[in-house]
Amino acid sequence: MATNLDNELEDALKAAEAELPAVAKPAEPPPSKPRAKRGKGSMALLVALLAMAGGVVVLFLVGFKEASIYALPTHEVVAQAAKLEGRRLRVEGELVPGTLVKRDSPCEYRFRMQSEGVELPVRFAACVIPDTFRDRPEGGVQVTVEGQLTEGGQTLEAANVMAKCASKYDPQTHKMNGPQSQNDPVQAPSAP
């Protein structure tokens, strides 16, 4: 009897399906790529990006090393002259009073700078120097020179000369304290 019941139910189901209108079946999604291939592609992309980033970092560091400038006081430059010869330097010190000399042909300035009693000759092959760079008899003119040591580390060949202003402005009194800045050209003796 159970088999009859099963057959009757099967026949009733087939008859009911025949009476229903046809319904569209949803489309099946396309078969997806295996995950293993997608993982290999992502790994290759990650490795390529890391290699490029590493290359940029190496180029940055190598470029920085070549463009770096050592900033030292005059006495340390003189002490390490053999080691620093030919390298780009930024040397800080004080203009030795009475040593600023202008030469007209070829146009250049020569002077000596010092720190802690140690002097270094400087040659600046340019016709124009900063307005604040003046040879004052009382001294105290702070100067920063960028350039390279030449002549066996005995002379600093300057590419740039920067002088700190010796005057001080007092905002309370609205006046300058210390040596007065003048708008006259640099007073440097000429060399023969």
Image (cartoon, rainbow, N blue to C red):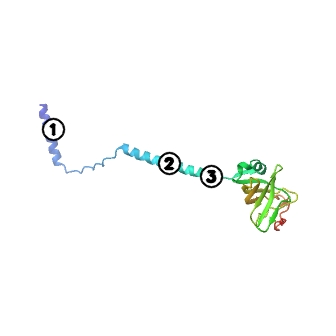
Per the image, label 1 sits on a secondary structure element best described as: helix
Residue type for callout 1: Leu
Mark with earlier residue (1, 3)? 1
User: Is label 1 or label 2 in front?
Assistant: 2
Q: Which of the two residues, 162 or 3, is positioned nearer the viewer here?
A: 162
Label 2: few (<14), some or many (≥20) within 10 Å? few
Where is mark 2, residue-wise? 51
Residue type for callout 2: Ala
Per the image, label 3 sits on a secondary structure element best described as: helix
Where is mark 3, residue-wise? 64
Label 1: few (<14), some or many (≥20) within 10 Å? few
- The answer to whether 182 appears left or right of 3 in the picture is right
Quadrant housing the C terminus: bottom right
Where is mark 1, residue-wise? 9
Label 3: few (<14), some or many (≥20) within 10 Å? few
192 w.r.t. 155: above or below: below
Q: In which image quadrant can residue 157 be found?
A: bottom right
**Residue at the limit of the structure toward the front, as seen here:** 152
At which x and y percent is residue 180? 85, 62
At which x and y percent is residue 167? 82, 59
105 w.r.t. 98: above or below: below
